[in-house]
Image: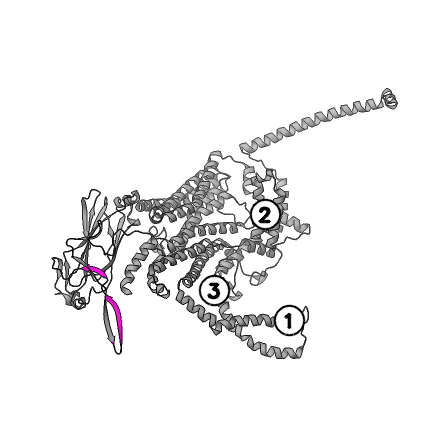
Amino acid sequence: MSHTLVPFTTKCWEQLNGKQNLIRDGSLGQINQLKDGWVTRHKDDWVYYQQQYVNVSLSNYLVSIAAVGGCTGQNRLKPTGFIYLDNGKNFTKSGRKMTSVADAPVTQTITVDETSYMRYFVDDGAMVGNLTCILSWEIPDKSAVLYEVSFDRALVVSYQFLDGDGISISNLSTGVILNSNELPDVTLPPLTRFITLSIYGSKAFPPCLSYVYAGLYVDKEASTLYKTCARLMSIFQYLSLGNSFMVPFLFAIMSWLSDFTFPPPTRFLCRQPSHGVLLCIFLMIGSFIFTQAWNVINSQSSIFHEWLPRAAKIIELFLSFFLYALYFYPLFLCYHASINSRLANILGCFCVLVLFGLRVTVDLPSYVITYARDPPFLALNALNVLPTLAANFIVITYFITRSITFQACDICRVHFLQVSDIEETYVRRLWNGRSVKTKRAATSIHWLVLARTFRQHCTWRTLMDVGSYRRLWKIWGRKLFGTNKYIRVPYPIKISLSILLFCLGQLIPVMLIQLVGVGGVIPTHICLWSPYLSQMKYSTTPMAFAERTFMLMKIAVYLTVLGAGGWIFRRVTKDIGEIRSGNYALFKGKRNNDIDLDDAIRFLGVCIGFGFTGTLYFMLEIALIGTFVVIVIQLERVRDAVLHHLGYGAFFASFFIALVVQMIQKRITRILFLSNGSYFDIKNRSPLLHYWYFMMFTSMTRALTSYLLRTLKLLFRYPLYSLRVDRNAETWSVRRGDGGFIGYCGMLKAENHFNNPTVLVFIECLLHLLVSKQPRRVGLCRLHRMKMDLEKTETVLLHQNGGLSSRRARTRWFHAITLMNNPRLQKSRIHK
């Protein structure tokens, strides 16, 4: 089988990846027969060597091995000239045997793809032709065994590059390659449209070719696009670094010369509204975080590798994330100062443009060169980049709008920082004696509540109202995630999960490309192992086995990658409610724990890191499980052998029998030896002791398999269980070393310390008294000034209308009483 393994691997790779071989008749089976195929100067310069067998006799038995032939090579019996000749005089020094390369090549002219995409990179000097000559690594025939002792196998490949008119541009030769089939990559000169390929072989000991493959790919680092983007990326990096110093310096001067307050980059210690623009800024930095996280996992260099000095490359991993935070530091400052200064909005526009330019220069070469090889993956990546583009567009639109329409206004500042009264409502319910439930109800009740709410609001008017759908979505989301409307989800949780989901969304197409894309891990290994694994099927067709296995593996990978996710909102809501009620069982030492503010600072990083890395490895684990399932489906002999062993084996059968016996034993124990409604109140004591004696030994049958089941459950369950930082299955003695869980506990304590509802309401009462005693002049923007003027006008009109109507009413009542007291009218009313 070895003489067909290497050619099959290349053919399989070509078939699964859908990359057409530029060589026509790659197996060299139709020399001088095809119009655009292989040709020789004379008809019999290259011949096909039939497959032959060498018999090896060992003692009393005979072994037959297919060892020679089955390939095409130089005709050793035909006399020709030579282009290279070595008589082996320097064998003692160089180790080279006698070699003679015949001047009788096999030639074919291949056409470079005429698409504008390929033509551009060929003319750009970035197109590399990867020509692979695969030898059978066998002796052409039996008589060549003797030549192998004294002769080397040699190969020479020459290239002639032609333009569109067939005019020669340049020539290139590999030189003499001894005892190897590895050819160096060749860069096509500009304007190349055709390549004339000539293969020369040694005479006495010819290289026997089984398959020849030629393909073209783009050398990304040699392209003008990559070089231009690399230069622009360095410029944008320096601009981003300059912004991180310029913006704080300008804000410091403004705060010193005016009443401007230096803004914080984040407000994680206090309540803050969920601004969509702030979320978009975090998504912008999330795209850079994903790039760096993927580089770390694959041990690749970051965008700072060439930019950092040699001494700093030792701590490149730490510096890369720190520099990303430094790049976005001025943007966060500008956002929080955008409500107070026009200059902050202008600087924010510039920061967004610089960061967007940096993002484009990082991703553009990959989209144009790497992803463009596969149109489906290019479309998937283009669709996946839409959230990043939308986030950048929203942020730049916000800053441009604020730069044009900015007006200092105290009411706008209040609205910018205003949050809903969730904590106040929470305290109000506690004062009214109502408890705040944190447990999640049954799923069926969720759907009943949702259906009842929908029926109550289901009218033609509400069906056309977007707000009604928003309210229904809010109700359904709370029921689904287990959140409570009286407990605010901390903003770090929202930001962390948003960035994590964004990074996982970016991970999906990258994983698909790495696993099932062109040159991916799965097609490469399938082609490598199919000749061996196909022998375990009843119908041994390696190519059909490889194609079917690849299809099943693609299904497994797509289901694995697209099915990743996690839940954390429900746990956060429950834990915050427990802490507010005084239950600190989540922490080691309960109230006397040693978790401090430093643990809370690390929450966002550990949440994203745990989720990203854990989800990635969980995907790989599920992919391995899918691989096992595919192997079980494909390998018929192995499947039948395993099922036969398990179906009739004593170990497997005993497990099921023990399971059934345990179920029956439990029923017997409850009926015969336990009192009604009790778990340990026994009856029939004497028979129970005899029953106990026998059953305690028979239970060992299932116990022998319980350990295996526990290991399997732990193998499949623990990786998924460990994705979330809010869960920990370890003991308290080692739980302190879990950075993810400790960061989560620190976030909970910080949230309870700084945003405790009772403390907030108490402080609000004190602040209300202080503010009411200190009147302050309020600055208004044009819109709020118009609203206030309109309210004053309406108040004056209402007052005037109220006074006029009161005078009219008094006049009418006076006339009515006068008429009632008139004697004549009284008599007329009596007569009537």
Q: Nearer the viewer, mark 1 or mark 3?
A: 1
* Residue placed under numbered mark 2 in the picture: 475
Mark 3: few/some/many CA within 10 Å (<14, 14-19, 20+): few
Q: Is residue 64 magenta?
A: yes
Circle 1 sits on which residue? Answer: 670
Q: Nearer the viewer, residue 366 or 11?
A: 11
Mark yes or no: residue 176 visible. Answer: no
Left or right: residue 86 versus residue 464 is left
Give the structural element (helix, strand or loop) at label 1.
helix
Check the image and report above or below for 519 versus 254: below
Q: Which residue is mark 3?
A: 715
Q: Amino acid at mark 1?
A: Arg
The residue shown at (57%, 35%) is 778
Q: CA distance from mark 2 to mark 1?
A: 45 Å
**Mark toward the start of the polypeptide (1 vs 3):** 1
Query: In the shown orientation, is residue 161 left or right of residue 282?
Result: left
Q: Residue at x 73, y 24 (%)?
A: 808
Residue contact between numbered discs 2 and 1, judged by CB atoms under 8 Å: no
Query: Could you say where residue 233 lies in the image, as x and y percent from the top left?
Result: 35, 46
Residue 804 appears anywhere in the view? yes
The image shows residue 370 at horizontal and vertical percentages of: 34, 49
**Distance of label 2 from label 3 (alpha carbons):** 37 Å
How many numbered dots are placed on residues in this image? 3
Q: Which residues are magenta?
A: 58-79
Element at label 2? helix
Which residue is more in the foreground, 626 or 310? 626
